Image: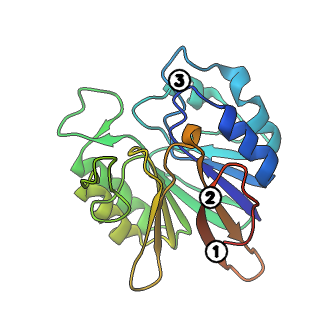
């Protein structure tokens, strides 16, 4: 199973659509920030749903109502709920959307307590292959364009609590990766309009999972 991961489109979907044709994935995962309300509409998702299935979390620039209403061709929701787990072809994917804040003054703000609660719920329901978030774990694939750290402690705690084999995130617009001592990976997909994507390969028969950063237009090989 080949999986294309995209992120931070901000209304510019052309590179993501090109990646669909180049990678020809079986599944598409998104770390959110498709674009602000009014920048994209339901028709823009057609090519992704036709490749399908598409699973996404949300960031701080997303038409949340539209994402919640979208359905894959098999009728399954496109948007993964907070702390929800989806299984597709044997791959178990969990999601925690939004960006960190101390309050809920914006609908896309999540607090330390929110993230900790969802993380415990996910961890209690068995092993996770891929954790999908918009925000990033501090100290792991969280370098900003200025070179500073831009991750959050709550997402690092989520990574530790859930212990996914692979954690996909975005938000910072810098494609980068981090591998822990026990072989687990964090991949910040980066900004797909700038050509950044990630390609994952999952073998349902053996459970093998590999991931790598890539550029739109380059040949899709094994992870």
Q: Could you say whether the residue bearing mark 3 is in a helix, strand or loop?
A: helix
Residue at point 64%, 31% (across, down)? 13
Q: Is residue 90 left or right of residue 57?
A: right
Q: How many marks?
A: 3
Q: Residues under labels 2 and 3: Cα distance?
A: 31 Å
User: Position of 130 compared to 4: left or right?
Assistant: left
Q: Position of residue 214 (x, y in %)?
A: 62, 58
Quarter-of-image position of residue 118:
bottom left
Residue 14 picture location, percent across and down: 68, 32
Residue designated by label 3: 65
Q: Nearer the viewer, residue 180 or 197?
A: 197
Residue 78 horizontal/vertical position (percent): 64, 39
Q: Earlier in the sequence, mark 1 or mark 3?
A: 3
Q: Quadrant of the C terminus?
A: bottom right
Give the answer, above or below, for where 223 lies relative to 17.
below
Q: Are marks 1 and 2 in contact (CB under 8 Å)?
A: no
Local SS, label 1 = strand
Would you name the residue on which mark 2 appears? Answer: 214
The local secondary structure at tag 2 comes to strand
Q: Which residue is nearer to you in this view: 89 or 138?
A: 138
- Characterize the local packing of mark 3: few (<14), some (14-19) or many (20 or more) Cα atoms within 10 angstroms: few
Task: Please name the residue that numbered disc 1 is placed on.
Answer: 209
Is residue 166 depicted above or below 155 in this figure? below
Q: Is residue 163 visible?
A: yes
Q: CA distance from mark 1 to mark 2?
A: 16 Å
Which numbered disc flags the more N-terminal residue, 1 or 2? 1
For the point 76% across and 60% down, the residue is: 219
Q: Badge 2: few (under 14), some or many (20 or more) residues near its Cα, within 10 Å?
A: many
Q: Residue at x 68, y 22 (%)?
A: 42
């Amino acid at each position: 199973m080949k999986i294309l991961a995209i992120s931070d489109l901000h209304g510019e979907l052309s590179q993501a659509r090109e990646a669909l044709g180049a990678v020809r994935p079986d599944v598409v995962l998104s770390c959110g920030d498709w674009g602000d309300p009014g920048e994209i509409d339901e028709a823009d998702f057609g090519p992704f749903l036709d490749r399908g299935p598409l699973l996404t979390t949300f960031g701080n620039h997303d038409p949340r109502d539209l994402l919640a209403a979208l359905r894959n061709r098999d009728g399954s929701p496109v948007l993964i709920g907070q702390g929800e787990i989806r299984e597709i072809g044997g791959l178990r994917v969990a999601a925690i959307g939004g960006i960190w804040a101390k309050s809920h003054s914006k609908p896309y703000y999540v607090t330390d307590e929110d993230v900790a609660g969802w993380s415990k719920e996910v961890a209690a329901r068995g092993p996770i292959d891929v954790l999908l978030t918009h925000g990033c774990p501090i100290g792991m694939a969280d370098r900003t364009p200025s070179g500073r750290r831009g991750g959050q402690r709550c997402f690092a705690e989520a990574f530790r609590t859930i212990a996914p084999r692979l954690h996909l995130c975005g938000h910072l617009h810098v494609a980068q990766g981090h591998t822990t001592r026990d072989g687990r990976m964090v991949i910040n997909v980066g900004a797909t309009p700038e050509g950044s994507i990630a390609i994952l390969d999952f073998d349902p028969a053996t459970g093998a999972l590999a991931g790598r950063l890539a550029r739109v237009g380059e040949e899709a090989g094994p992870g």
